[in-house]
């Protein structure tokens, strides 16, 4: 091909290439003009089926995107106060999420989430893990009950150790004193009496610790049986009759007879014995302690009232705590362990009842143990429907029929026994109802 033809060919190819380039540039420019200047990034979404799996977990679950937007939150997360209005409301939890998102390492911590003024915080265990490059998963568990139980056990062990040290230390010192005063018969007898007192206190403390350990879970009574309330009161008063006589205190039973409760007779006797013991201990000499039992709609109210020193109003909310003492010095002088009212509270809870207290400082106290009452079939049966139709009149008397003798009125109900005390009459005599006078027999019809 000659040089002229080659020049023309290259010129045509150059024109075509330039026209194609210009056309491509124009088309690209039109497409760019049709698009918005900036595009919003796609919103992160949870993978299919993940929310269903998270909802089935017992733990609280949160799913966050890279902008801390809550994509999924289970009901426990809302109940614990972690989420409100689609946002995480706990700054410490957000800081943990940011740290996990930054380096991809799984982290866990325990948080205290406030519940408002006057309420204790909620203890929440949180575990944070990356689910993808843009999603973060948070698993939470409520540990409030576990922390409370740990605190109770820790305080219980500390208090038991302290309480055991007192009588054990006293016994050690008294044993040394007896050894040194071996030649002094009078001193040996005096120290031996003190040792017996401390040993009795130690035995009572150990026994109450064992009883409290059986009741502290507040589990319902396994075998519910009818309980004779009169018999429970009798046993509770008998348990404290020696202490009452020593202080010349009258223990009076003034209540309805023949009531029956539902539960465990030994546990109810233990609870009532503790209430009577407290009343006797903190009542002045020559005073009266009244035990009463009243029937309510579905409960039996057993109340122990004394005229003792009373309890300050600001202490009433704490008297049922383990080892709590309103006056520690007085408890040491009386040999109290600080466990009696705590046992009463647990017995009431295990029976589905409650214990309440009224007290006025300097005037006395009144403790009421409320437990379920045994109801009869007549009480639980629905009322009978009235008979249909008008009531039938009395049958006409035959002129030959003999005159009917008017019915003899029923005998008057037995009179209630007079109030008696623990020192003036046996308990069996106090609780026994005197037999009713026999009524005249009615004439047979």
Image (cartoon, rainbow, N blue to C red):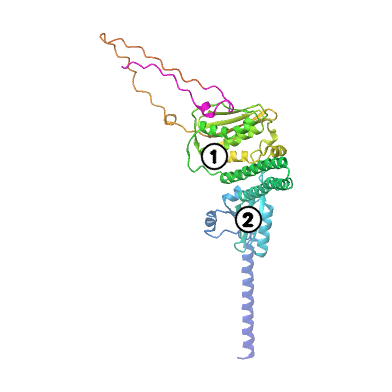
Question: What kind of element bears circle 1?
Answer: helix
Q: Is residue 166 above or below residue 6?
A: above
Q: Report the side of 338 relative to 379 (left or right).
A: right
Q: Position of residue 152 (x, y in %)?
A: 64, 47
Q: Residue at x 67, y 55 (%)?
A: 94
Segment tinted magenta in the rendering = 417-445
Mark nearest the camera among 2 and 1 is 1
Give whichever of discs 2 and 1 has the lower sequence position.
2
Residue 68, image quadrant? bottom right
Q: Secondary structure at mark 2?
A: strand
Which residue appears at 30% of the width and 14% of the height?
Answer: 395
Q: Are marks 2 and 1 in contact (CB under 8 Å)?
A: no
Which residue is identified by label 1? 267
- For label 1, the crowd category at 10 Å Cα-Cα, with few meaning under 14, some 14 to 19 and many 20 or more, is many
Pointer 2: what residue?
126
Query: Which residue occupies the extreme top position in the image?
Result: 399
Q: Which of these two is toward me, 237 or 345?
A: 237
Q: Is residue 256 visible?
A: no
Residue 28 percent across, percent down from the top left: 63, 68
Residue 93 is covered by the magenta coloring: no
Measured as percent of width and height from the top left, residue 374 is found at: 47, 33
From the viewer's side, name the closer residue of 204 and 361.
Answer: 204
Figure check: 417 above or below 33: above
């Amino acid at each position: 091909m000659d040089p002229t033809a080659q020049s023309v060919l290259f010129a045509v190819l150059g024109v075509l290439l330039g026209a194609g380039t210009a056309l491509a540039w124009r088309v690209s420019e039109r497409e760019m003009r049709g698009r918005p200047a900036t595009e919003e990034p796609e919103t992160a979404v949870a993978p299919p089926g993940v929310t269903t799996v998270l909802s089935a977990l017992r733990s609280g679950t949160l799913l966050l995107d890279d902008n801390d937007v809550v994509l999924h939150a289970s009901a426990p997360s809302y109940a614990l106060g972690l989420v409100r209005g689609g946002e995480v409301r706990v700054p410490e939890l957000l800081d943990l999420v940011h740290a996990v998102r930054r380096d991809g390492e799984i982290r866990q911590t325990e948080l205290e989430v406030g519940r408002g003024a006057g309420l204790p915080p909620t203890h929440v265990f949180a575990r944070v893990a990356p689910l993808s490059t843009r999603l973060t998963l948070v698993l939470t568990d409520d540990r409030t009950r576990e922390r409370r139980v740990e605190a109770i056990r820790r305080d219980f062990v500390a208090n038991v150790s302290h309480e055991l040290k007192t009588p054990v230390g006293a016994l050690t010192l008294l044993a040394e004193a007896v050894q040194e005063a071996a030649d002094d018969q009078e001193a040996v007898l005096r120290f031996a009496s003190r040792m017996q007192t401390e040993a009795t206190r130690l035995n009572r403390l150990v026994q109450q610790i064992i009883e409290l350990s059986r009741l502290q879970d507040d589990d319902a009574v396994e075998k519910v049986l009818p309980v004779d309330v009169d018999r429970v009161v009798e046993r509770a008063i008998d348990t404290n009759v020696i202490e009452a006589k020593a202080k010349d205190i009258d223990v009076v039973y003034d209540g309805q007879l023949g009531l029956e409760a539902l539960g465990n007779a030994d546990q109810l006797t233990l609870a009532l014995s503790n209430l009577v013991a407290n009343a006797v201990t903190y009542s002045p000499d020559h005073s009266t302690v009244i035990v009463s039992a009243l029937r309510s709609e579905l409960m039996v109210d057993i109340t122990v009232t004394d005229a003792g020193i009373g309890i300050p109003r600001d202490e009433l909310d704490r008297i049922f705590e383990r080892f709590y003492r309103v006056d520690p010095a007085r408890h040491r002088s009386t040999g109290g362990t600080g466990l009696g009212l705590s046992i009463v509270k647990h017995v009431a809870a295990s029976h589905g009842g409650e214990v309440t207290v009224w007290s006025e400082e300097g005037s006395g106290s009144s403790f009421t143990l409320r437990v379920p009452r045994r109801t009869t079939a007549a009480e639980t049966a629905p009322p009978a429907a009235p008979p249909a139709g008008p009531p039938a009149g009395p049958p006409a008397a035959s002129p030959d029929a003999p005159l009917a003798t008017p019915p003899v009125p029923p005998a008057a109900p037995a009179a209630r026994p007079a109030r008696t005390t623990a020192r003036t009459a046996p308990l069996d005599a106090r609780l026994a109802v005197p037999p009713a006078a026999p009524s005249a027999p009615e004439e047979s019809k």
